Image: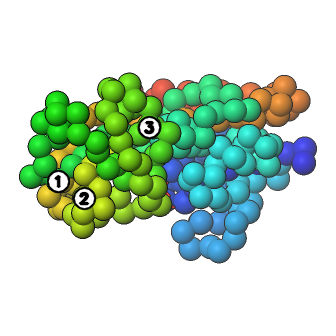
Amino acid sequence: MSGITIALSKGRIFEETVPLLAAAGIVATDDPETSRKLILATNRADVRIVIVRASDVPTYVQYGAADLGIAGKDILLEHGGAGLYQPLDLQIARCRMMVAVRADFDYALAVRQGARLRVATKYLKTAREHFAAKGVHIDLIKLYGSMELAPLVGLADAIVDVVSSGNTLRANQLVAVEEIAPISARLVVNQAALKLKRRALQPVIDAFAVAAEQGHARR
Ligand code: PRT
Ligand code: MG
């Protein structure tokens, strides 16, 4: 396809991307929250938006099924970034990758004693690298969501998950005990598309850069 295909996920990424798209002169003609369409047309005949799972955005862009995408750093750390150019930190969908445990679990003591920890997460690579760097032995338990439940029902001693307000942790008597990394959403671009379609893509990337800078300055 000669036009531009942008991969986005529904929910917070889409919502926070709408103003950035508008700054680039791109307005979706359907709302992904109400439409069942997976390919959204825009006001520009040469630009379309594909709606994918947040964790699938890097894959669509890596293989060139989308030229551009917006993905959380959490997702990119797991994906590894192969085939992707990451020119911009958009400073949206911000949160922190944390280790959390039950409020009544003495994490520092368990680490000092060299205990083997059971860690539940959907972020396997991030968790593996974090605990390996600390020299803490873990058994990893892969989950696909609702990680906060795992320590409450005895599935795990700790979770690795992203936290924004902290309300979900508090509501479940969990506490964050370590920050692994600050997280925000990044623009990702297919490396080959950037070379082959530079004239079409560069103005969009530049408009995103200016809008992200202005948005960040306002916050
Ligand atoms: O929901 P789905 O399973 O389809 O996919 P997803 O959860 O990967 O996507 P989505 O749309 O929920 O998140 C997209 C991106 O937003 C993530 O990849 C992060 O980069 C970013 N982000 C920012 C967050 C949060 N903030 C966040 N709070 N992603 C998830 N959460 C979760 C958090 O883990 C907790 O369970 O939201 C819940 C509420 O958080 P608190 O701390 O405000 O209570
Ligand atoms: Mg979610």
Q: Residues within 10 Å of mark 2 (few under 14, many from 20)?
A: many
Residue found at x 23% / y 39%: 115
Task: Look at the image and tell me whether residue 89 can be seen.
Answer: yes
Tag of residue 26: none
- The image shows residue 42 at horizontal and vertical percentages of 72, 56
Asked which quadrant contains residue 193, the reply is top right
- The image shows residue 176 at horizontal and vertical percentages of 21, 43
Residue type at numbered disc 2: Pro
Residue assigned mark 1: 102
Q: Verify CB contact (< 8 Å) between mark 1 and mark 3.
A: no
Residue found at x 24% / y 67%: 153
Give me the C-alpha separation between circle 1 and circle 2. 6 Å
Side (left or right) of 211 relative to 27: left
Side (left or right) of 142 relative to 208: left
Give me the C-alpha separation between circle 2 and circle 3. 18 Å
Q: How crowded is mark 1: few (under 14 residues within 10 Å), some or many (20 or more)?
A: many
Residue found at x 56% / y 73%: 34
Mark 1 or mark 3, earlier in chain: 1
- The image shows residue 199 at horizontal and vertical percentages of 83, 28
Residue assigned mark 2: 151
Residue assigned mark 3: 128
193 relative to 66, above or below: above
Q: Residues within 10 Å of mark 3 (few under 14, many from 20)?
A: some
Residue type at numbered disc 3: Arg
Give me the C-alpha separation between circle 1 and circle 3. 20 Å
Residue found at x 67% / y 50%: 7
Mark 1 or mark 2, earlier in chain: 1
62 relative to 15, above or below: above
Q: Nearer the viewer, residue 138 or 162?
A: 138
